[in-house]
Amino acid sequence: MNFKSEFAEVLFSSLNGELEKNKLEGMIEKPRFEHMGDMAFPCFELSKIFRKAPHSIALELSEKVQTSIFENVEAVNGYVNVFLNKKMISSEVIKDVLSKKGQYGNMNNGNGETITLDFSSPNIAKPFSMGHLRSTVIGNALTLIAEKNGFSTVRINHLGDWGTQFGKLIVAYKMWGNEEEIKKDPIKELLKLYIKFHDEAERHPELNDKGRAWFKMLEDSNEEALELWKWFREESLKEFSKIYDLLGITFDSYDGEAFYNDKMESIVQLLNDNNLLMESEGAQVVSLNDESLPPCLIKKKDGTTLYATRDLAAAVYRKTTYQFAKSMYVVGNEQALHFKQLFMVLKKMGYEWHKDLVHVPFGMILKEGKKMSTRKGKVVLLEDVVREAIDLALDEIMKKNPGLSSKEEVARQVGTGAVIFHDLKHYRQNDIEFSLKDMLKFEGKTGPYVQYTHARAASLLRKGAYKETSAAFFVDDKEAWPIITALMSFPDVVQRAFTEYDPSQVAKYVIDLSQVFNKFYSHVRILDNDELKQARLSLVLAVKIVLKEGLRLLGVKAPEEM
Ligand code: ARG
């Protein structure tokens, strides 16, 4: 419920449509003093239109603007001042949250339609990068937010498991590789081989030709090539799943680039039939000149396919398989051109649904202002980062609450929650600075702060022996009202976070809700007054429910104790 627009609505009908509703809403002010009400409408502009004194207009209007959410309406000095019926509103809101529980804020904008979300999508035989972490947590949150908005979702991990680089890796492995060592530490060893290949290829460029030839053999299903590729892929997936397990993130499909190997020929055929393919220096391309974009490369000179070819096949496959209403790609800014080209080629192919494809880009993670790089052997292993966060969380818990029973599990929830929340509280397009110390603080705008607030609410409910049925829902404390208005705005936040593909709105929301709740907590002795205790606890429970649900939408757990 939006009080302002409700007020504008009644003004609109009281004025017989003389001014537009939006215009009226824009005119509504917040009175300077509390005794003047919660909202005020100035009548000075109307005085010109109706050729009457502002005060007499205010008087007339104050008779007419009536709605159940107003307790009192007064005309004062040319203003219509309204007082909200806080008692009625707050008990309605609390009742609503308590009865819907986690379902509170569920929307049906999606009508059950399907959205596919392509996110995480790391490249095999390479470390899971910071960029992939961003894609993973943003994509996971957007999936949960889409579901909350009534869509059904398909989570796709479009693994980077195909391409010339695997031809190169095969060459490198055959020349310098050692099976045992790879088995011990697959990603590190494979990366080493990859780096060595590039070093050597600088001096011996013929190695590149060898690499290309092996990729060609891979695309042509050469047995040895396939065998090695499969092995690299499996070892890599084992590593990646450790991170997904830690973060508690799952996928519906791991169909990556290789999956489209046998689905590209028909796409190339279609492009050909539509006269879209042309030759350029021996390669096959789709010209996007008329769109002021560079051409989209479809096939190389040697007949092998490219990243874009596989994405074309993937888009068509997803449309036929899932009948999506929208198809999202959560991939860093640096691939913006790729997606522009991809969507444009699909448009040229005559696919109406090209307009349902969305690239959801994001900025970089920086360390001391610089891009965190995985190249040049300087590997930041993400699993280590997450584990370090968990260790630090455990230290903190040992200091704060050494008697806690399930310390390890709570530390996991707090450590991963801190990393995820730190990412999501920033608007995704902004670059963010990575600092474990900052993200693990229990105060300030962090995940642990929100989790801590949730645990505090849980503890109050335990200590106060809250009984749901006996509750009277009205809380008269001044500090309760900001909580009520925050609770009321949750559905709007859920909706906006989806339409703007912006999980940071949910993150900011749970911080705001935590802050108003903690203010209430520090001013009101919730458990002291027996008469008011149950009513106050009903508010505490409503806060707890919405904090937990907000965190869930971000992919963050809410422990009961910490
Ligand atoms: N594997 C790619 C990378 O790491 C990301 C893939 C994104 N998804 C896609 N359909 N292109 O850069």
Image: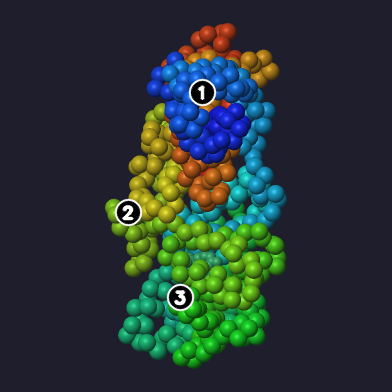
In the picture, residue 320 is in which quadrant?
A: bottom right
In the picture, residue 560 is in which quadrant?
A: top right
- Residue 154 placement (x, y as % from top left): 64, 57
Q: Give the mark count.
A: 3
Q: Check disc 2 and give the amino acid type.
A: Lys
Q: Check disc 1 and give the amino acid type.
A: Ile
Q: Which residue is mark 3?
A: 293
Q: Is residue 198 visible?
A: yes
How far is the residue under mark 1 from the one under mark 2?
61 Å
- Residue 532 placement (x, y as % from top left): 56, 11
Label 1 environment density (alpha carbons within 10 Å; few <14, some 14–19, many ≥20): many
Q: Residue at x 56, y 13 (%)?
A: 533
| 187 in relation to 541, above or below | below
- Looking at the image, is mark 3 or mark 1 nearer the viewer? 1
Q: Which residue is mark 1?
A: 57
Q: Residue at x 70, y 50 (%)?
A: 112
Q: Is residue 405 left or right of residue 352?
A: left
Q: Which residue is mark 2?
A: 367
Q: Which image quarter is the N terminus in?
A: top right
